[in-house]
């Protein structure tokens, strides 16, 4: 590296690079296979997370707590409430007297829905004025409220037909309209969003954790002294420790995508190849971050702690937990430098919107830059001596 | 220059402001077996690590195989086999996998074949698939040495390679070392065993990070200027007590059924012993040669007096 030895060191590329890299990769694969615990974790984490989150995705929850504010007491109101109840989605636990009371119930989370039937509902319906029934939905968990809202829309045509036999039933327009207010998640992001997110979250967690232990483990076990005394270069050690886990990332990716397709019916609108390629890039970025932590941490425990410190903002500020657009500016700024943020845009873009690479140039570049920066830092941080 | 394998000058290394190796100057010719001795914590491992580029000296210069230890450790590593004091091959890899890994890293042609040959040489044929971590201590040492020799290095740095190894295996090991040296390989080996020191072409003794003596076994014994007497007879324990306070006696060491009594001042020692002989006829005294052990123990106690205080001062 230093100036004087450039005379002696051959300027051509070292032909031993691939051989040593291969030796390192082979060694890591054998060790990975022998480490039953880690190996089990590699497969168990995606399956477990899918089951846990998948439960939330897949269920179509019924009997959601609901408050009704009826400002009209006529027979039509009663029929409407009965129809709502009959959908099976709503469990009307509260009959409230004022909007304030209803708000309090929603914001405290006691109910997920508030339904307000306006004054003069009966009269306005009969006059054919199509009054609005206000539905306030706590949409922070769109998977929970989505089904209920569509069920509600489904009852409009028949709910009051029996009561409205007569002249007003003649016209084919609906008797009333719904005005739906989604609180907490105005975009009403669909459940489909979660699966691409899950792909990113699982890869972030496992990939980073695996490489985070890579260097510290060798130091703790004393094998680093032997490794460093051999003619192997830091970049070979790094790539040798990262590459085998890219393969693990592939397996996890396959599990998640198959589950997405066949269990949860999430489509892949765009190119599968592109998705696989960019997911690999994302896995590489996280492996690089983990490896960097590994070169900074003093022991395995510290490495794990650093991983979790990095994992948290990834989960919270990337748009996985909360809609990105709804976050305050400072949180968005932090989110922009996290790899998961960009991957979520990529994965959702490809899977749900059918985006091509030109639609996501910035996110792809961000991931590449992120990965190279992490690797560069790792190489700087990597100590080739025991000092 | 070409017939020198290791040449270092005034190497110094400290950890947390404590000097661990101080002004170490050493020259080892090609094809020599150099024994590196010294008490625990004297800086042997630290010195060896500096030689192969695992530690950067604070000051001093030197070459290994003609390459600068400060700037060319990349090149040194290709031709040096370093056996660490603590087993540092992969315990979760089998014997075969470890040896193949080493072969590949050093670019040995046909690594599978090379590993198999090494396993045969070690006499581990039936156990090649056993995990290294499951081997007994002695076998671990032998495996580590095998891995070290496998890439055919020109210089071997062996840090206590025979600690915990049985006598037969130790004999085999030294035969192998001499065989390698005859082929022109240089060996620097640290040890605490005197019999091993006597098998080396040259030895060096380090204490408190300073190389105190350096040369052939005969040179070292001669240079010590020590006179030694052998005494046998009844009640040696009481005699030891008495000798410890006798003028001219620097050191009394039990040696089987006799005592080794040594002193730097030969005249004074002789005078005291003649006096003892006259007053107490129950002991049999003979003049003898100091053993290497006598010399080292003497060096150690001397070093204690000279450097312990100095080191403590520097640490504060
Ligand atoms: N990495 C380190 N950090 C701090 N102190 C160290 C380090 N390595 C060695 N030392 C100290 O340096 C001194 C010399 O250690 P070294 O291992 O070189 O001794 P040694 O001669 O090999 O001893 P032994 O015969 O017990 O193997 C010891 O006091 C040790 O505590
Ligand atoms: Mg040592």
Image (spheres, rainbow, N blue to C red):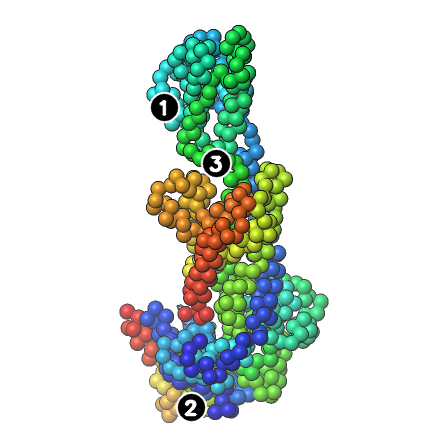
The N terminus of chain A, quarter of image: bottom left
How far apart are the two marked residues, 1 and 3, measured between alpha carbons?
24 Å
Dot 2 crowding, Cα within 10 Å, few <14, some 14–19, many 20+: few
Q: Is residue B276 left or right of residue A155?
A: left
Residue pointed to by mark 1: A104
Up-down relation of residue A82 to residue B62 (above or below): above
Q: Quadrant of residue B88?
A: bottom right
**Residue, x 49% and y 46% (percent of image)?**
A344
Residue pointed to by mark 2: B223
Mark sitting earlier along the chain (1/3) = 1
The residue at label 2 has a CB less than 8 Å from ligand 1: no
Secondary structure, mark 3, is loop
Looking at the image, which is closer to me, B306 or A226? A226
In what quadrant does ligand 1 lie? bottom left
**Residue, x 43% and y 79% (percent of image)?**
B71
Residue A18: where, in percent of width, then height?
58, 70
Secondary structure, mark 2, is helix
Residue pointed to by mark 3: A189
Q: Is residue A335 left or right of residue A262?
A: left
Q: Is residue B20 left or right of residue B159?
A: left
Secondary structure, mark 1, is helix
Q: Quadrant of residue A317?
A: top left
The C terminus of chain A, quarter of image: bottom left
Dot 1 crowding, Cα within 10 Å, few <14, some 14–19, many 20+: few
Labels 1 and 3 share a subunit: yes
């Amino acid at each position: 590296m230093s100036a004087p030895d450039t005379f002696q060191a051959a300027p051509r590329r070292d032909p031993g690079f691939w051989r040593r890299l291969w030796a390192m990769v082979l060694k890591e694969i054998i060790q990975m296979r022998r480490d039953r615990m880690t190996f089990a974790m590699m497969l168990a984490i995606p399956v477990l997370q899918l089951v846990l989150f998948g439960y939330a995705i897949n269920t179509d929850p019924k009997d959601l707590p609901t408050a009704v504010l009826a400002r009209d007491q006529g027979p039509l109101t009663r029929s409407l409430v009965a129809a709502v109840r009959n959908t099976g989605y709503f469990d009307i636990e509260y009959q409230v007297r004022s909007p304030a009371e209803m708000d309090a119930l929603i914001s405290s989370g006691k109910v997920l829905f508030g339904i307000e039937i306006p004054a003069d509902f009966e009269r306005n319906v009969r006059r054919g004025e199509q009054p609005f029934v206000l539905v306030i939905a706590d949409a922070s968990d769109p998977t929970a409220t989505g089904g209920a809202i569509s069920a509600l829309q489904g009852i409009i045509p028949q709910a009051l037909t029996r009561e409205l036999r007569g002249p007003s039933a003649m016209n084919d327009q609906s008797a009333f309209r719904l005005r739906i207010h989604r609180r907490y998640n105005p975009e009403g992001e669909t459940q489909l969003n979660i699966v691409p997110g899950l792909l990113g979250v699982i890869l972030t967690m496992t990939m980073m954790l695996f490489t985070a232990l890579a260097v510290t483990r060798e130091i703790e076990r004393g094998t680093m002294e032997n490794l460093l005394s051999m003619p192997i270069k830091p970049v070979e050690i790094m790539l040798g420790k990262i590459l085998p886990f890219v393969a693990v990332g592939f397996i996890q990716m396959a599990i998640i995508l198959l589950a997405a397709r066949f269990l949860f019916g999430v489509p892949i609108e765009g190119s599968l190849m592109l998705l696989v390629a960019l997911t690999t890039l994302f896995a590489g970025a996280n492996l690089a971050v983990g490896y960097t932590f590994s070169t900074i941490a003093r022991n395995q425990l510290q490495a794990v702690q650093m991983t979790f410190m990095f994992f948290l903002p990834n989960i919270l500020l990337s748009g996985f937990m909360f809609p990105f657009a709804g976050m305050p500016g400072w949180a968005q700024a932090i989110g922009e430098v996290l790899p998961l943020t960009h991957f979520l845009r990529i994965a959702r873009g490809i899977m749900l919107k059918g985006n091509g690479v030109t639609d996501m140039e910035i996110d792809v570049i961000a991931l590449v830059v992120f990965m190279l920066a992490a690797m560069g830092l790792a190489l700087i941080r990597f100590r080739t001596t025991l000092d | 220059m070409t017939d020198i394998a290791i040449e270092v000058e005034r190497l110094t290394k400290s950890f947390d402001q404590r000097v661990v190796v101080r002004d170490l100057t050493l020259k080892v010719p090609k094809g020599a077996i150099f024994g590196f001795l010294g008490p625990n914590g004297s800086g042997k491992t630290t010195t060896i690590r500096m030689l192969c580029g695992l530690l950067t000296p604070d000051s001093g210069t030197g070459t290994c195989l003609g390459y600068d230890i400060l700037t060319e450790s990349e090149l040194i590593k290709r031709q040096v086999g370093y056996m660490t004091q603590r087993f540092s091959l992969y315990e979760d890899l089998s014997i075969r996998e470890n040896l193949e890994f080493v072969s590949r890293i050093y670019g040995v042609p046909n690594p599978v074949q090379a590993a198999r040959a090494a396993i045969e040489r070690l006499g581990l044929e039936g156990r090649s698939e056993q995990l290294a971590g499951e081997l007994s201590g002695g076998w671990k040492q032998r495996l580590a040495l095998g891995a070290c020799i496998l890439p055919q290095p020109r210089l071997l740095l062996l840090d206590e390679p025979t600690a915990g190894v049985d006598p037969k295996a130790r004999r085999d090991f030294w035969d192998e070392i001499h065989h390698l040296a005859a082929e022109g390989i240089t060996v620097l080996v640290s040890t605490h065993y005197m019999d091993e020191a006597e098998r080396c072409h040259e030895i060096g003794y380090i204490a408190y990070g300073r190389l105190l003596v350096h040369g052939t076994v005969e040179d070292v014994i001669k240079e010590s200027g020590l006179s030694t007497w052998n005494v046998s007879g009844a009640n040696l324990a009481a005699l030891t007590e008495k000798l410890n306070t006798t003028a001219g006696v620097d050191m009394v060491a039990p040696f089987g059924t006799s005592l080794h009594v040594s002193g730097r001042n030969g005249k004074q020692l002789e005078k005291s012993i003649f006096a003892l002989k006259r007053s107490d006829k129950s002991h049999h005294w003979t003049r003898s040669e100091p053993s290497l052990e006598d010399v080292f123990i003497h060096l150690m106690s001397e070093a204690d007096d000279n450097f312990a205080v100095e080191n403590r001062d520097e640490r504060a």
